[in-house]
Amino acid sequence: MKVLNRWFARVGTTLALLGLAAGMGILAVGFLSAALYLALMQTLGAPLAALATGAALLAVAALAVLTIKVKVSPPRQGKGISAEPEGPATAAKLGEMLGEEAGTWTKRNPGTAMLVALAAGFVVGSSPKLRAKLLRLLR
């Protein structure tokens, strides 16, 4: 019981610190945007300064999305005939590979895995439609 209490204390502290860090990050982006706007306003005027600040924020967001896409997308394979089996055997092999990858990742990142599972449980628990679709999928 003591171990469980310590675990919950660590999880609570981690979540609180992550929330604080996220809030500070949002505030930092707000202040940096305001500073950029005020600096540009003196030379460009208010409308163009707002346009330039918005364009800079969109560029940073697009760069972040592009980075995520490159990191997450699978590597491209050359065209050719695959020697892989088809149908249920392929699905079984894919499930096995995904299970191994998920197990390895979970062992390397136990804290993140716990937070992902917590978030997924919250989403499934709060959405009756999603819960019904998942139950239909599992049957």
Image (cartoon, rainbow, N blue to C red):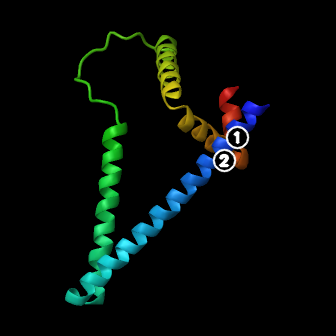
Residue 78 is drawn in which quadrant? top left
Residue 38 visible from this viewpoint: yes
Return the residue at label 1: 8
The residue carrying pointer 1 sits among few (fewer than 14), some (14 to 19) or many (20 or more) residues within 10 Å by Cα, namely few
Amino acid type at image mark 1? Phe
Residue 61 is drawn in which quadrant? bottom left
Q: Residue at x 43, y 13 (%)?
A: 86
101 in relation to 119, above or below: above
99 in relation to 135, above or below: above
Q: Residue at x 64, y 43 (%)?
A: 11
Between the C-alphas of marks 2 and 1, the distance is 6 Å
Amino acid type at image mark 2? Gly
The residue carrying pointer 2 sits among few (fewer than 14), some (14 to 19) or many (20 or more) residues within 10 Å by Cα, namely few
Residue 130 visible from this viewpoint: no
Residue 26 is left or right of residue 139, and the answer is left
Q: Residue furthest right?
A: 1
Residue 120 is left or right of residue 82, and the answer is right
Residue 34's spot in the image, x, y percent?
37, 78
Return the residue at label 2: 12
Q: Residue at x 66, y 47 (%)?
A: 12
Check contact, mark 2 vs mark 1: CB within 8 A: yes
What is the secondary structure assignment of the residue under circle 1? helix
Q: Nearer the viewer, residue 122 or 18?
A: 18
